[in-house]
Image (tube, grey):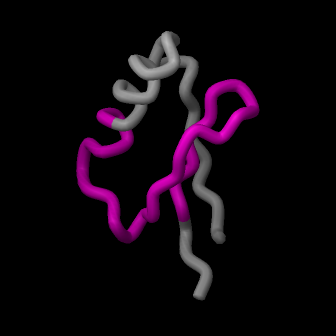
Amino acid sequence: MKEPWIVFYLQDKELCAITVRGSFPGEIAATKEQLAAEHGCSKKEIHTEIIVR
């Protein structure tokens, strides 16, 4: 069964994805902060899209 995923990108590279159903309030912001720290960039450079997979 397909469901919506929140996909995190740095430029055009997919970094990770989480299900909308399994996410919690504040998770997007926390994930962006973590990914920015891991990849040495600003959290403003990380963008998200909701994609059905």
Residue 7: give x, y in percent of width and height: 57, 49
Q: Residue furthest front?
A: 38
Residue 49: give x, y in percent of width and height: 61, 47
User: Is residue 3 on the magenta stretch?
Assistant: no
- Quadrant showing the N terminus: bottom right
- Quadrant showing the C terminus: bottom right
Residue 36: give x, y in percent of width and height: 45, 20
Number of numbered discs:
0
Nearer the observer, 6 or 41:
41
Q: Quadrant of residue 24?
A: bottom left
What segment is highlighted magenta in the picture? 5-30
The residue at the point 51 percent across, 12 percent down is: 41
Q: Is residue 8 above or below residue 50?
A: above
Is residue 24 toward the left or the right of residue 21 in the image?
A: left
Q: Is residue 2 above or below residue 12?
A: below
The residue at the point 43 percent across, 63 percent down is: 20
Q: Is residue 20 above or below residue 17?
A: below
Residue 18: give x, y in percent of width and height: 45, 57
Q: Residue furthest right?
A: 12
Q: Is residue 31 above or below residue 37?
A: below
Q: Quadrant of residue 2?
A: bottom right
User: Is residue 15 on the magenta stretch?
Assistant: yes
Q: Quadrant of residue 10?
A: top right
Q: Residue furthest bottom?
A: 1
